[in-house]
Amino acid sequence: MTAKIIDGKTVAAELRARIASEVARLKSAHGVTPGLAVVLVGADPASEVYVRNKSKAVTEAGMNPVDRHLPATVSEVELLALIAQLNADPKVNGILVQLPLPKHIDAQKVIHAIASEKDVDGFHPLNVGRHASGSPGLVPCTPLGCVILAKTVKPSLEGLDAVVIGRSNIVGKPVAQLLLSENATVTIAHSKTRDLAAVCRRADVLIAAIGRPEFVRGDWIKPGAIVIDVGINRVTGEGGKSKIVGDVAYAEASRVAGAITPVPGGVGPMTIACLLLNTLRATCEHNNLPAPSL
Ligand code: NAD
């Protein structure tokens, strides 16, 4: 058996196209243009690439990018003042602070300072609490992307056994919450889990968010399972060239799974698409307009 490849690039492009047409409709029907503020502190090369890609996607969707680039030496007080200014700006519907921040700045303090209704990353404790208690709120982008991809294979995840490896606040925990709200039976596995391979073999849906190259082996996978690989790991491949691999041993796993995301080209492209989706949803909420059905 060879697994179906879940093409995140195509799914993300389709979602972005639907978002762009909804943005155009918002503009013509209501004179509203969503604005997304992306705050970058310092000059970390990876963060600079992420921020550039985000701004490009925001513009392509017809939204207004509001980029704020601050030097690595900026004080916490100055950064918090900028957040307060963006919170108060009616043209800004979403605020994203690119992580990691320099060591002298308390990232938690900064995340808490973002108005929860503009928290398009879904990391603010109010949104985490809303999500956990089943109230509407903004949901983290990468987990949302994982669930959208799984549902392209099986539109209903109800009753399925889902195993999430990883319990970070950014991926593991929120993706487990989302799967629970899809009525899956969810297990969260982590570094202290006993017999991880046996736990994974129960999974109809397996989400790997570990950060270890090709850690999940082919014989850990239940035949026919949906495998969503969140991992982004840079390794040295043949000929000393560096390449990106996921947390799942793709070649082995794709001989057993029913469907699997590649790395790159799986979960990665969905994160920005879901960021745009959250910005659109936040804009509708701020303007008392019904949430778009995308
Ligand atoms: P993290 O380091 O915060 O968390 C890793 C989790 O893996 C931890 O909860 C830990 O318990 C678990 N873990 C570690 N070793 C383990 C082991 N031996 N057995 C079982 N579990 C183990 O990482 P994160 O921020 O959640 O990111 C995970 C991966 O996803 C990374 O590769 C990251 O680069 C990637 N990621 C991708 C995207 C994207 O595609 N856009 C977004 C965020 C993170």
Image (tube, rainbow, N blue to C red):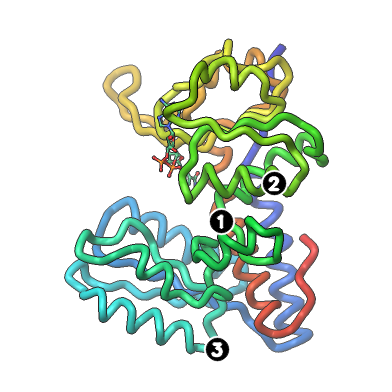
Q: Where residue 90 sits in the image (x, y, percent)?
A: 55, 89
> Which of these two is toward me, 102 or 6?
102
Looking at the image, residue 172 sits to the left or right of residue 108; the answer is right
Q: Is residue 98 visible?
A: yes
Q: Which of marks 1 and 3 is nearer the N terminus?
A: 3
What is the distance, in whole Å, between disc 1 and disc 2 at their CAs?
Answer: 13 Å
Disc 1 or disc 3, which is closer to the eye?
A: 1
Q: Amino acid under label 3?
A: Pro
Does residue 251 sit above or below 161 in this rendering?
Answer: above
What is the distance, in whole Å, between disc 3 and disc 2 at their CAs?
Answer: 30 Å
Asked which secondary structure carries label 1, the reply is: loop
Quarter of the figure with residue 134 = bottom right
> Which of these two is toward me, 264 or 143?
143
Q: Give me the residue at 46% from left, 58% from top.
A: 53
Q: Which of marks 3 and 2 is nearer the N terminus?
A: 3
Q: Mark 1 points at which residue?
A: 140
Asked which secondary structure carries label 2, the reply is: helix
User: Dividing the image into four equal quarters, which quarter contains ligand 1?
Assistant: top left
Q: Give me the residue at 64% from left, 13% from top.
A: 255
Quarter the N terminus occupies:
top right
Q: Mark 2 points at which residue?
A: 148
Q: Give me the residue at 52% from left, 20% from top.
A: 196
Quarter of the figure with residue 74 = bottom left
Q: Where residue 154 sits in the image (x, y, percent)?
A: 79, 35
Instruction: Mark 3: give few (<14), some (14-19) or many (20+) Cα within 10 Å.
Output: few
Does residue 107 sit above or below 287 in this rendering?
Answer: above
The mark found on residue 90 in the picture is 3
* Disc 1 + disc 3, Cβ < 8 Å: no
Q: Amino acid under label 2?
A: Ile
Q: Earlier in the sequence, mark 1 or mark 2?
A: 1
Instruction: Mark 1: give few (<14), some (14-19) or many (20+) Cα within 10 Å.
Output: many
